[in-house]
Amino acid sequence: MSANIYSIESLLVGTHYRSNTAEGEIVSAEKHPKGVWYGSNCESYLVEIRQGVGDYVWRTLAVSVA
């Protein structure tokens, strides 16, 4: 028996993102280089969101790892 192993980054890519200032598909994700702190059970990720043709924005989001 084998198990599929996924990274948080690979699970975020392709996910729909919506906030008050941006909406679209996450096209890339990486651990935040500055390690923004959201809580003791969270990791921060820097994600690139495609909002439309040629329109990309970056956002920081928290992922619970508890």
Image (cartoon, rainbow, N blue to C red):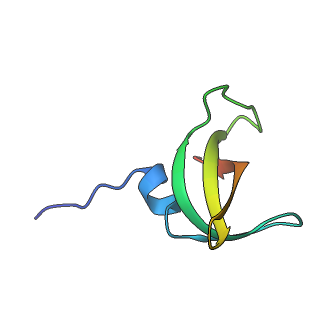
Residue with the most extreme top position: 34
In the image, taking residue 42 as reference, residue 14 lies left or right, namely left
Displayed quadrant of residue 50: bottom right
Image coords of residue 66 (percent x, y): 59, 47
Nearest the eye: 13 or 36? 13
User: How many dots with numbers?
Assistant: 0
Figure check: 2 above or below 38: below
Find residue 51 and report its image quarter. Answer: bottom right
The residue positioned 66% from the left and 28% from the top of the image is 35
Q: Residue at x 64, y 61 (%)?
A: 49
Above or below residue 44? Residue 23 is below
Spot the residue most to the left.
1
Q: Quadrant of the N terminus?
A: bottom left
Residue 10 falls in image quadrant: bottom left
Query: Which one is nearer the viewer's eye here, 27 or 63?
Result: 27
Q: Residue furthest right?
A: 20
* Residue 32: percent from left, percent from top: 62, 35
